[in-house]
Image (cartoon, rainbow, N blue to C red):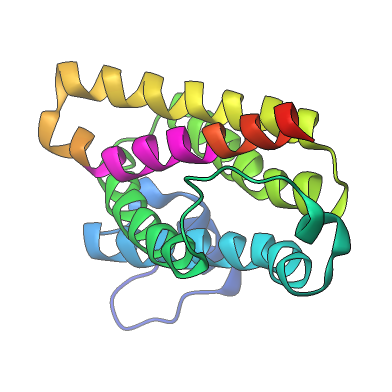
Amino acid sequence: MESPGSKLSFYDVFRIWMEPHRMSYKSRVVWFLFLNFSLLAVGSIFTGDALQNDDWYKKLNRAPWEPPGWVFGFAWVTIMICFSYYLAGLFAEKSPTNNIFLTSCLALNTLWSPLFFAGHQVGLALVVMVLLDLLIWFKFITEMRQRKKRAFLLLPYSLWLLIATSLNVWVLAMN
């Protein structure tokens, strides 16, 4: 690292941002908020247009318990805030398994929307959703044994995934 008062190079800043365990807790929260909401925005590119203009989606037989659209936005904002705080705590320590967990979660979560909404691949989207379910629930159960307070930050994500999975199953079964 540079001495106090000297400027950090772009490489130094990039390296620190790619290694969240080196950041302060507050910086990690901000980093994960930025990362999670950026990828959520990518997914919403596929979702928003489909909800408005896609005849395929409009004609789907959807589950009677499907919540109104505003609930999805509220749920995902809540989930991403909680998940960001969860990740900030998780990444206090450097661990390759943390990186694998994060990368897997972000990839699966981001992949679902284009598969379902743009690709109309309901079965494949369900596989992605179930993998994400398993990953988040495994982490939730593991954390409940070790760090209960931190585990509760995964609860909104865990519960929402069950609802989302049930909606995906309904669409697959009824269309």
Residue in the picture at 24% in, 64% down? 26
Q: Main secondary structure of the magenta part?
A: helix
Residue 45: image location, x then y, percent: 72, 69
In this view, the residue in front, 170 or 127, is: 170
In this view, the residue in front, 139 or 94, is: 139
Q: Is residue 74 magenta?
A: no
Q: Quadrant of the C terminus?
A: top right
Q: Is residue 16 left or right of residue 148?
A: right
> Is residue 27 positioned above or below 153 on the image?
below
Q: Is residue 1 visible?
A: no
Q: Is residue 156 magenta?
A: yes
Residue in the picture at 57% in, 39% down? 167
Number of numbered tags placed on the structure image: 0
Residue 156: image location, x then y, percent: 31, 45
> Is residue 96 positioned above or below 6 on the image?
above
Q: Quadrant of the N terminus?
A: bottom left
> Is residue 8 positioned above or below 57 on the image?
below
Residue at the left extreme of this rendering? 149
Residue in the picture at 39% in, 81% down? 6
Residue 133: image location, x then y, percent: 49, 27
Residue 3: image location, x then y, percent: 33, 71
Q: Which residues are magenta?
A: 153-164
Q: Which of the 4 image quarters holds residue 40? A: bottom right
